Image (spheres, helix red, strand yellow):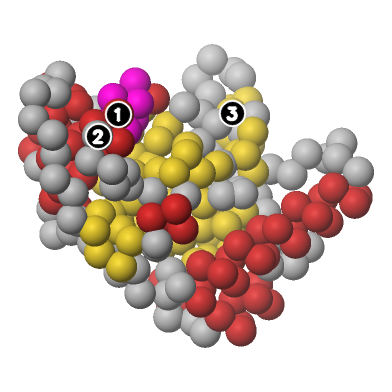
Amino acid sequence: MLDANWPDSWRGAFRIEMRAEAIGLAWRGWPVLPGAEPAAITADGGDLTWRRPVPAQDNWRELIATHPHEVATWFGDDTHSLLVATGTVLDAIEVDDELGKAAARLLRATGHPAPIVAMPNGRWLFLTTVAASIPRELADHASIQWHGADDYIPLPPSPFQHGVVHWRVKPEVWGWQLPEAADVHDVLVRALTGDKAATPVVTLTTAA
């Protein structure tokens, strides 16, 4: 969430940055969505924790194909985060910090690492093309989550508990090309099993 202690000028600049990022992604064909402020919940131990950012509108599925000009109107004073719907243009595989670092090292060996998002809760998101399924090794692992059809993820610079979502590898660094899902899945499986013997071959696909 936006820190209530921030000066108004900082909060305004932050919202301007988020709006500009949303418009840029929308012009690239990414299905961006306005996000609501996460709600505080009480954990089992009585401590307050924060849910992830969620869409600001209940009909978010109907907004996926919205024109960028209308997207610009969504990001005003009441918008608290930037989301992107998964399952149409892109998917994401969410992993913990340890697996994320191992997979990123393997991807760097190809010279074509995937766009990677890091969240302040220690979770990483590897962006890929859309997939019909993921390998069982990933699906059965408790700390791995596939964001595909009918789902969404936060993108930078969304505020999050104790920090801000940020890019570890920006999509523009690689010409807005998304790696094929199967290639990244293979790298994640190898990182999960500790197999670093072979250099992965990653096929890139230009995002719409």
Residue with the mark numbered 3: 49
Residue with the mark numbered 1: 105
- Residue 157's spot in the image, x, y percent? 61, 49
What's the distance in space between the residues labelled 2 and 1, CA to CA? 7 Å
User: Are discs 2 and 3 less than 8 Å apart at CB?
Assistant: no
What's the distance in space between the residues labelled 2 and 3, CA to CA? 37 Å
- Residue 186's spot in the image, x, y percent? 13, 40
Three-letter amino acid code at the position of disc 3 = Thr
What's the distance in space between the residues labelled 1 and 3, CA to CA? 32 Å
- Residue 134's spot in the image, x, y percent? 14, 47
Q: How crowded is mark 1: few (under 14 residues within 10 Å), some or many (20 or more)?
A: some
Which quadrant is the N terminus positioned in?
Answer: top right
Q: Is residue 131 left or right of residue 103?
A: left
* Identity of the residue drawn at 33% across and 61% down: 177
Residue with the mark numbered 2: 109
* Identity of the residue drawn at 86% across and 40% down: 6
User: Are discs 2 and 1 less than 8 Å apart at CB?
Assistant: yes
| Residues shaded magenta | 98-104
User: Are discs 1 and 3 less than 8 Å apart at CB?
Assistant: no
* Identity of the residue drawn at 8% across and 24% down: 197
Three-letter amino acid code at the position of disc 1 = Arg
| Camera-nearest label, 2 or 3 | 2
Q: Between residues 5 and 169, which one lies in front from this camera angle? A: 169
Quadrant assignment, res 40: top right
Which quadrant is the C terminus positioned in?
Answer: bottom left
Q: What element carries label 2?
A: loop
- Is 24 rendered above or below residue 138? below
- Is 94 rendered above or below residue 72? above
Badge 2 or badge 3: first in the primary sequence: 3
The number of numbered discs placed on residues in the rendered structure image is 3
- Residue 21's spot in the image, x, y percent? 60, 62
